[in-house]
Image (cartoon, rainbow, N blue to C red):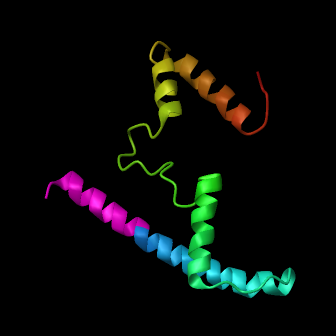
Amino acid sequence: MSEIRTRRLVGLLVRILLFFVASAVVVWLWNGIIPWVIGFPPVTYWQAAGLLLLTRILFGGVLSRRNSYPWPDEPTGRGEQAAARAGEGMDTEEKAGYRFRNRALLNGRDDR
């Protein structure tokens, strides 16, 4: 097998293992907290796995591929690729100002 296929297979197996572990954590947390606080009934392992899949479908946050690019020097998504292209014509000082403004906007401040 090639190195890329091996990486993909290992990545898939790790994701499957993480899904089963996360399902067990959901069962443990749900059965320990929710019946006591809200009064909902306890869930089984497979119901917890279904809840994880449902949250993945609805919110896209459980075991997502975001920020999991195997090579840290390469962009992970379209937004970073666009930002890299936008910075091609800038000198170092302009890039620093651009990063500062974007970081401030992401943190909820408008320091323009």
Q: Nearer the viewer, residue 2 or 86?
A: 2
Please indicate, yes or no, whether residue 61 appears anywhere in the rendered image: no
Residue 105 within the magenta-colored segment of the rendering: no
Q: Residue at x 66, y 29 (%)?
A: 102
Q: Is residue 7 visible?
A: yes
Residue 56: quadrant of the picture: bottom right
Viewer-nearest residue: 11 or 103: 11
Give percent across and percent down for residue 24.
56, 81
| Relative height, residue 99 to residue 2 (above, below) | above
Q: Is residue 77 left or right of residue 109?
A: left
Name the residue: 85% across, 82% down. 37
* The C terminus: image quadrant: top right
- Compared to residue 58, the image places residue 28 above or below, namely below
Say which quadrant the N terminus sits in.
bottom left
**Quadrant in which residue 46 is drawn:** bottom right
Task: Determine the residue located farthest toward the top in the rendered image.
Answer: 89
What is the x, y in percent for residue 17? 42, 73
Residue at left 15%, top 54%? 2
Q: Is residue 36 left or right of residue 88?
A: right
Look at the picture and state if 109 lies above or below 54.
above
Residue 95 image point, x, y percent: 55, 22
Most common secondary structure along the magenta stretch: helix
Count of all numbered marks drawn on residues in the image:
0
Residue beneath the point at 45% across and 41% down:
76
Residue 34 located left or right of residue 76: right
Q: Residue 94 lies in what quarter of the image?
A: top right
Image: magenta residue range: 1-15
Residue lying farthest right?
38
